[in-house]
Amino acid sequence: MKSLLPDLRSPQRVAGLRPAPAPAAGGRAGHEARRGAWAALFRRHYLRSLEDYRFFYDDVDEIGCAEKADHVFYFVPGINGTPGQMRFLLPSLTRVFGHNLYLKALHLPEFSARRPIWEKYSVANVERKLARLRADLVDLLARFEHISVACSSNGLYDFVAAVGSLPTAAVAGRLHVMWGACAPDHFEPTPWEKLFFPLNGFEHDGHRWFAYPNHNAFQIFNPETSRLHRWREGHQERLFHKTDLESRFHCCGFEWDYVSTDQLGAMVRHVVEKIASPWGEPAEALVAANDGYWQGLSEPRIIHSIRRYLPGARVVFRPASHLWLANPTFMTELFERQKAKVPPLRR
């Protein structure tokens, strides 16, 4: 592992860089102590990456023709997800449901793929997101008899919090929920923060942010640190890059991602506290059996947690980590189960 990780004992050895100078006497020592030696460098690389080509990680929030659709889908992204990620699902969607589809995603400018993650997750922005989610559902229900709601990761909590304010008679039997890559309803502290905050971390509005590296070799520590996934099904084979699907930036020879278990955890708690009652309709839940966000929790305990919010869910586990559960094989399986429950629209 020594050849793969930066030598944290001697920061200046990585890419010929020098750590940030110590604050002068009488300077802002307390402030400087709350940022890593290379915080400015990492932030600079991250902010520059927001203008990179992202493929599926962008702000495309509508696909297809609503007037000709046989099936309608509403996509609710998870933490730091973007609407354009739904395009990654199109091969499986069209295989199962055909080509006459209309897809709409929850989206606001405050959550743009071009916006730094630490600026997205404020209480005010989360409230705006819940309001938009409710408004989108009201609009779609006024236009279509049946809507498949696809929630990714933490997005299910946004959906359940928002739909609770809608009249039961307006949604019963008409919203058909799928939850893929189910994530827990909280963020746990991680030892990675102790390792990487001194390297690249900083504080924003009182919350600690740090970047952690991605490389497939790091999966022995956490399955969510992979950067590549080789998918195979029969004669088909693809190599998927995480940077096409999620926010990643290059620095010091690695791909990195920013996270704050403190700030993001507070936002998830804020949403969960707004859930008045679970979504009681039948639902499909797809869980990654090797999902690092569940931190080794047993399948029965994961199912118990999921059914606190989806008591009528059919829960299926598949061998994958969190992101790579969204591969064509498992998504096709999920959509086939969904199609059996959702009739096509009548025109």
Image (tube, helix red, strand yellow):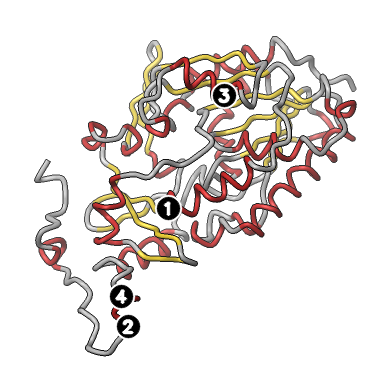
Q: Answer left or right for 167 relative to 309.
A: right
Mark 4 and mark 3: Cα distance apart in space: 42 Å
Q: Earlier in the sequence, mark 4 or mark 3?
A: 4
The answer to whether residue 190 is above or below residue 316 is below
Find residue 28 and name its label: 2
What residue type is disc 2 on? Answer: Arg
Mark 1 and mark 2: Cα distance apart in space: 23 Å
Numbered disc 3: secondary structure: helix
* Quarter of the N terminus within the rendering: top left
The answer to whether residue 57 is above or below residue 26 is above
The residue that appears at 22% across and 58% down in the rendered structure is 252
Find residue 306 and name its label: 3
| Residue linked to disc 1 | 260
Report x, y in % for residue 161. Answer: 70, 39
The residue that appears at 47% across and 49% down in the rendered structure is 54
Q: Are marks 2 and 4 in contact (CB under 8 Å)?
A: yes
What residue type is disc 1 on? Answer: Ser
Mark 4 and mark 1: Cα distance apart in space: 19 Å
Report x, y in % for residue 89. Answer: 56, 29
Q: Answer left or right for 212 relative to 144.
A: left
Find residue 32 and name its label: 4
Q: Earlier in the sequence, mark 2 or mark 3?
A: 2
The residue that appears at 67% across and 41% down in the rendered structure is 105
Q: Are marks 2 and 3 in contact (CB under 8 Å)?
A: no
What residue type is disc 4 on? Answer: Glu
Report x, y in % for residue 204. Answer: 45, 66
What residue type is disc 3 on? Answer: Ile
Instruction: Say few, some or many: other residues with alpha carbon within 10 Å of mark 3 (under 14 / 14 to 19 / 20 or more).
Output: many
Q: Earlier in the sequence, mark 4 or mark 1?
A: 4
